[in-house]
Image: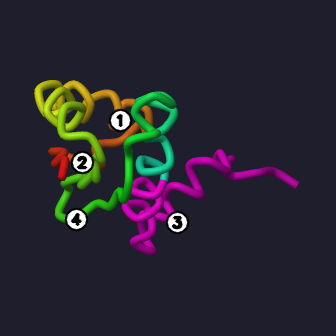
Amino acid sequence: MKRKRAICIGDLLRHYLREEGLETPLNQHRLINSWSEVMGNGILKYTGELFIKNQTLWVQIKSSVLRQELNIGRQQIVKRLNEHVGAQVIADIKFY
């Protein structure tokens, strides 16, 4: 029996997720879960709620001083988080 064309299972899964509209929610979930790994435990101690709305990551920071520091470097944080996930998930980040 001759095979016509072999397809990688990873490509098949990505195609299926994209077709079913599940790729974006999955990437958003991965990005939120990667916050602690990308930012480290020091910042994680002061982090509250995280959620994504309209390609903006909203992060509750319990320290006003840290909030200001993170706000200064927010474009770099956006870049690092997107690179960690491997997709353009967020365009901006807001600290509250």
Q: Is residue 36 left or right of residue 89?
A: right
Q: Disc 1 residue type?
A: Leu
**Label 1 environment density (alpha carbons within 10 Å; few <14, some 14–19, many ≥20):** many
Q: Which residue is mark 4?
A: 53
Q: Which quadrant of the rendered structure holds the N terminus?
A: bottom right
What is the CA distance from the residue labelled 4 to the residue labelled 3?
Answer: 24 Å
Q: Disc 3 residue type?
A: Tyr
Numbered circle sitting on residue 81: 1
**Label 4 environment density (alpha carbons within 10 Å; few <14, some 14–19, many ≥20):** few
Q: Which residue is mark 3?
A: 16
Numbered circle sitting on residue 59: none
The count of marks equals: 4
Q: Disc 2 residue type?
A: Ile
Task: Give the mark, 1 or 3, whose residue is nearer the N terminus.
Answer: 3
Task: Give the mark, 2 or 4, whose residue is nearer the N terminus.
Answer: 4
| Whether label 2 touches label 1, CB < 8 Å | yes
| Whether label 4 touches label 1, CB < 8 Å | no
Q: Residue at x 68, y 47 (%)?
A: 6
Q: Which residue is mark 2?
A: 90
Q: Is residue 1 left or right of residue 45?
A: right
Task: Give the mark, 4 or 3, whose residue is nearer the N terminus.
Answer: 3
What is the CA distance from the residue labelled 3 to the residue labelled 2?
Answer: 22 Å
Asked whether residue 26 is drawn in magenta, I would say yes
Q: Is residue 53 left or right of residue 13?
A: left
Q: Position of residue 74 (x, y in %)?
A: 17, 32
Task: Tell me where the magenta segment starts and ends, as one range.
Answer: 1-29
**Label 2 environment density (alpha carbons within 10 Å; few <14, some 14–19, many ≥20):** some
Q: SS class of the residue under badge 4?
A: strand
The dominant secondary structure in magenta is helix
